Amino acid sequence: MGEFVGIDPLGADKLIQRMEAGKGVLGRARPGLETAIAEAGQDWAGREGVTPMHRTWAFFDESQQDLKWRIGIIKRMVPTQQKGMLTGTFPFTSETEAVEAAGKDARTIAEALKLHDQHLSGQSWNEVEKALSALKGRADDPAYAATLLAALGPKTFQKLFRDWMNTQAKGDRRGLAPDALKRAGDASPGVLARIFASAESSGRLGSEWQKMVETAPSDILTALVALAPQSGTFLNRVATNLLNRPPNSDAYPTDPNWNLYNLAKAFGGNPEAFQRLLADHQKEAGILLDAYTIRTAGVPAYEEALAKALHGALKPGAGADDVRERAWLTVIDSIGSENTLWVGGSLGTFASSPVSRMLAQDIQPILDKLARGQAQRSSPEVPYLQPRAPWDKLDPAVSAGFMGALMQDPAAADTLMKAGQAYMKELDIGRFHPFDPSNYGQEAHVNLAERTGALANLLLAGSTYAEWSDDEYAERIAGFMLMPVDYADQYFPVASKIVSTGKAKGLDGVKDEMKKIITDYFDKKTPATARSVASTLVNQQVEWLNLSLREHGQRPLTTSEQDLMRDAMAGRLSDALIDALERRGG
């Protein structure tokens, strides 16, 4: 039994397509030929009529089926992205042989299970395991797998899982814990999960198996997706069903929820499926991301598994651009919406969150979308700021809440700061002077300046949710305030490395001054209000630019130019800055 096979799946697919075209030619020619033979009657010189044509069509059809069967097996046996020839030893030489073997194995399993139900002993269960272990080398054959499952049926299939859990993992009442899951992978549940994957991904299972998702216990479904890579379609059907079940539908709702953990781990292995879930199933994705869900799951590793799954789905370049962007929108809405527990409430803060850190790590490519939304809201009259769909529907207040949620983790806040600096550097605002004699140059400067200011505005707005010490808060606000100034200074040329170093030191100096002003306000060492402090900080920005000009031998700003720069900076930052100062210092 068995056959060594070498096949190029791509080439075989092309051959199948050509055979299909040949069948089409034969199918179109047959009616005309049959009519001509009938009209010729006794004058027909041929002996077999259209029989050779039928044989050719049947040859094409049978060859297609055989090739499809072989392609399905080789792709499962050799999971790889490489193109060209793949090789492997097939357990069966034909699909017919696979089907016959599956029927025989199903009968053996059913007999062993019947015997176990009568004796309920360790020995009788060992016979069941023995019957199932014989399937290990056959799981990759989709024809074999589908026939075996059809013979067993969903009820017996689930019973095999349940009986194993009852004898081997009695303490795991809300999904299999990692150690039990490892044992299951080496035993009958692992074989059954791989067989199910072969049959389901090839589209060979009947509707009764689709209904199983709606009725099977949660722990069986999550074991099924955790033990073997299932198709993305099936994984998302399992996820949407489980996440819509009542919160206390488990018999033991206070136990650690390994079902959630196993689901997150399965998504970690299938980032495209998770990306589609985030993009198309906002309600269910919101449950996975819900702060209450995360903190009450009873499985600390769940948040880490969720973070890794999010990274796979959201990292730059993952999947299709439009799907990835819609996935990001779901995450932002779920975490940043009003009343979200991510930014306060009875659960406390997320000061050490792998989810926050992972999202901050991957956020840079979408910062421009968030900045445009904030800029367009603040300055609707400025051209070319509008974010494109679907980002035009995102409320900037939700973006600020999202930023604030991430900022509760200091490491994530630092990463956001660096991402913002990289974004502003990428915009290269120095390409255009604010007082360029041409209207184009001035408008281009305003467009870029609005976006840099808008991002700083979002970070300032988000900072109101973060729980930092007064010193940390003053440090970060000063940093956010100087982000646009640091890059606005690029349009004033720096002649040498020494001068450039001096500029950096000067920027550190003004940051220290700003930080002291903020700290004095927090410590009530000054009668200043949040509004007057904000005005002072904006003045500091303009003075820094003017000082930099003089130090670099450039023409300083005129009084009117200073007023214009002051008004522009205040317009982009003041509201968020005043709100941040009032909330913290009030």
Image: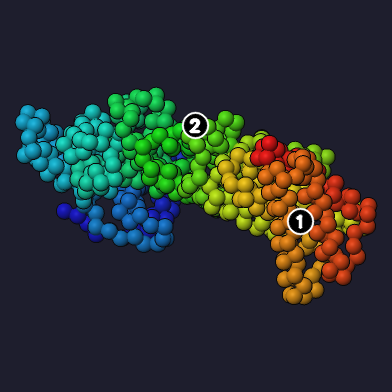
Q: Can residue 488 be seen in this view?
A: yes
The residue lying toward the viewer, choosing from 144 and 182, is: 182
Q: Residue at x 48, y 34 (%)?
A: 347
Q: Are marks 2 and 1 in contact (CB under 8 Å)?
A: no
Q: Taking 441 as reference, is 202 left or right?
A: left
Q: Taking 251 as reference, is 188 left or right?
A: left
Q: Position of residue 336 (x, y in %)?
A: 58, 37
Give the amino acid type for the residue marked by disc 1 in the picture. Val
**Mark linked to residue 13:** none
Q: Which residue is drawn at 16% across and 42% down?
A: 132
Q: Residue at x 77, y 50 (%)?
A: 537
Up-down relation of residue 400 to residue 13 (above or below): above
The residue lying toward the viewer, choosing from 126 and 166, is: 166
In this rendering, the label closer to the viewer, 2 or 1: 2
Q: Where is residue 61 in the image (x, y as percent from the top left)?
A: 35, 44
**Mark linked to residue 485:** 1
Up-down relation of residue 563 to residue 287 (above or below): below
**Which sits earlier in the primary sequence, circle 2 or circle 1?**
2
Quarter in which the C terminus is drawn: top right
Q: Can residue 319 be seen in this view?
A: no
Q: Where is residue 441 in the image (x, y as percent from the top left)?
A: 86, 56
Q: Find disc 2 in the rendering and name its residue.
A: 346
Label 2 packing within 10 angstroms: few (<14), some (14-19), many (20+): few
**Where is residue 548, by image quadrant?**
bottom right
Give the amino acid type for the residue marked by disc 2 in the picture. Ser
Q: Please, what secondary structure does the residue beneath circle 2 have?
A: loop
Q: Distance between the residues labelled 2 and 1?
A: 38 Å
Q: Taking 382 as reference, is 511 left or right?
A: left
